Amino acid sequence: MGNTSFPGWTAVQSSATPMWSFDTEKRVWEPFSSNLQETPNYGLSTEAPDQGLAFYLNGQIDNGTSYTTSWLGNNTLNLPGMVVLNLKNQTFENISTPGLLDGTYPRAGGSLEYMPNIGRNGVLVSLGGAYRNTSTPGNFSTQTLVC
């Protein structure tokens, strides 16, 4: 979105289809049915192939995320929640993440790992990243690193 030097660049005017999948049999890209308000970047992601699921935790938006976020300028805004993608029927659900740093400070960066052999359905482990002690936009470099 923000790389205006790309040959033939035009500004995107819609966020109607922020998520896409690739059908390996038909060899075509197809949009997911989506009602996401904002499409995050720099979030934590992993897959649970034994369950046909994938996960995208928190993340941020910035002035290159979509045509509606140019107001952020050089700032970022961290987003709460986790998107759980059902890879079998190409649907998803956006759920809250209340247990992550008391649920107040969503993360950007870091790593998300799935461990299938723990508990009945496995466990997701969030490692590292950064958070900001506010729910307002700010410079990415002002975030606190997670240890």
Image (cartoon, helix red, strand yellow):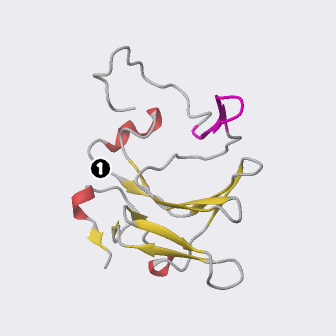
Front residue of this view, candidates 58 and 76: 58
Q: Quadrant of residue 34?
A: top right
Query: Residue at 33% of width from left, 16% of height from top?
Result: 7
Position of residue 147 in the picture relative to residue 47 (left or right):
left
Front residue of this view, candidates 78 and 19: 19
- Looking at this view, name the residue that lies furthest to the bottom: 119
Counting from the top left corner in percent of width and height, residue 138 is at 29, 56
Whether residue 104 is in magenta: the answer is no
- Looking at this view, name the residue that lies furthest to the left: 141
Q: What residue type is disc 1 on?
A: Asn
Counting from the top left corner in percent of width and height, residue 33 is at 71, 40
Counting from the top left corner in percent of width and height, residue 15 is at 56, 34
So how many labels did they put on this image?
Answer: 1
Q: Which span of residues is magenta-colored? A: 18-31
Front residue of this view, candidates 46 and 61: 46
Disc 1 target residue: 75
